[in-house]
Image (cartoon, rainbow, N blue to C red):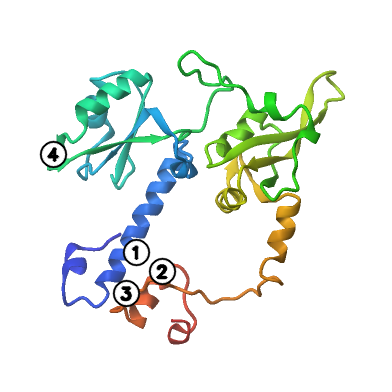
């Protein structure tokens, strides 16, 4: 960030808090970008399910390298990947075998590393994008594919119950299993159905139509999924997500007419000691304000 320690720690600095907030935002965005570039599905962190092979390592000393962590955790089993974002806010350790991950968790929890004590946490289920078309096998049981249960008969799914999302702009190369993957870890998920049609060139085969439906047990869960998954990039295509059937109608009716577009933003939870100058400095790095006094 090109900010010296004296700028942040100097009690005479008038915008130290602003610089610290900008630095934190930079670190968060940098970490997110790094994890996404290595196949991490960020929305999986809101899932309740926990992985048996992925360990999140927190409170690691700044400057800790992936090689150091690989040496420490690799002594307890075979590792599939080790991720350490540039800011070193946390690390991701992915074991090949669940029993080895459990052994490492018990042995290394609260271990001292450098000048810190590391904290371990099980990573979320479905954290990484699948690179194989073959479903993962856990305890010798092959999970039933989503399409086997929900895609044979379109009439079996009620899309007018307000709990179903309509997803379009799906890549034609995306398979049914691949389409279901980013949704199935969300709370109250029930099904994901990719719409297909018969392939005229290959009898018995089917082609994707580029859209599908995702269902949930509760309307609130569907609403949260829409907010989190709209704009999600899957196989190079940005998904467009909206309510299907009655849910779309209720969303349009809610609040009466559509809100007018505005250039103003409401900022809440501002510290009492914050000044207009602080708020202006915080947002100035994003877009220049034409009238800082009026807009702040």
Q: Residues within 10 Å of mark 3 (few under 14, many from 20)?
A: few
The residue that label 4 is drawn on is 114
The residue that label 2 is drawn on is 285
Which of marks 2 and 1 precedes in the sequence? 1
Q: Is residue 179 above or below residue 3?
A: above
Q: Residues within 10 Å of mark 4 (few under 14, many from 20)?
A: few
- Give the alpha-carbon distance from disc 1 to disc 2, as whole Å: 8 Å
Locate the C terminus and report the quarter of the image it occupies.
bottom left
Residue 17 location in percent, x, y? Answer: 27, 70
- Give the alpha-carbon distance from disc 2 to disc 4, as whole Å: 35 Å
In the rendered structure, the answer to whether residue 146 lies left or right of residue 208 reads: left
Comparing marks 2 and 3, which lies closer to the viewer?
Answer: 3
Where disc 2 sits, the SS reads loop
- Give the alpha-carbon distance from disc 4 to disc 1, as whole Å: 28 Å
Q: Are marks 4 and 3 in contact (CB under 8 Å)?
A: no
Which of marks 3 and 1 precedes in the sequence? 1
Residue 253 location in percent, x, y? Answer: 72, 65
Q: Looking at this view, name the residue that lies furthest to the right.
A: 200
- Give the alpha-carbon distance from disc 1 to disc 3, as whole Å: 16 Å
Where disc 3 sits, the SS reads loop
Task: Determine the image quadrant of residue 269.
Answer: bottom left
Q: Are marks 1 and 2 in contact (CB under 8 Å)?
A: yes
Comparing marks 2 and 4, which lies closer to the viewer?
Answer: 4
Q: Is residue 256 above or below residue 52?
A: below
Where disc 4 sits, the SS reads loop
Q: Residue at x 32, y 81 (%)?
A: 275
The residue that label 3 is drawn on is 271
State whether residue 272 appears in this view: yes
- Give the alpha-carbon distance from disc 2 to disc 3, as whole Å: 20 Å
Comparing marks 4 and 3, which lies closer to the viewer?
Answer: 3
The residue that label 1 is drawn on is 22
């Amino acid at each position: 960030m090109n900010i010296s320690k004296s700028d942040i720690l100097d009690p005479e600095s008038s915008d130290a808090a602003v610089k610290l907030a900008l630095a934190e935002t930079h670190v968060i965005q940098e970490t997110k970008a790094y994890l996404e570039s290595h196949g991490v599905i960020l929305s999986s962190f809101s899932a309740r399910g926990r992985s048996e092979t992925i360990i999140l390592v927190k409170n690691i000393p700044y400057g800790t390298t992936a090689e150091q962590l690989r040496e420490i955790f690799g002594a307890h089993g075979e590792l599939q990947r080790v991720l350490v974002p540039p800011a070193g806010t946390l690390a991701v350790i992915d074991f090949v075998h669940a029993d080895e991950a459990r052994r490492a968790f018990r042995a290394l929890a609260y271990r001292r590393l450098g000048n810190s004590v590391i904290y371990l946490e099980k990573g979320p289920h479905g954290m990484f994008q699948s690179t194989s078309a073959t479903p993962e096998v856990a305890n010798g049981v092959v999970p039933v594919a989503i399409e086997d249960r929900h895609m044979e008969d379109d009439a079996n799914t009620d899309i007018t119950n307000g709990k179903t999302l309509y997803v379009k702009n799906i890549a034609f190369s995306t398979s049914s299993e691949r389409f279901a993957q980013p949704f199935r870890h969300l709370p109250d998920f029930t099904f994901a159905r990719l719409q297909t049609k018969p392939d005229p060139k290959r009898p018995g085969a089917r082609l994707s139509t580029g859209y599908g439906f995702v269902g949930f047990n509760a309307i609130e869960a569907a609403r949260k999924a829409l907010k989190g998954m709209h704009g999600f990039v899957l196989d190079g295509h940005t998904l467009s997500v909206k309510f299907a059937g009655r849910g779309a109608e209720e969303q349009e009716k809610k609040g009466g007419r559509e809100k007018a577009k505005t250039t103003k933003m409401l900022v809440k939870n501002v510290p009492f000691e914050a000044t207009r100058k602080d708020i202006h400095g915080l947002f100035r790095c994003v877009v220049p304000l034409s009238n800082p006094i009026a807009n702040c």
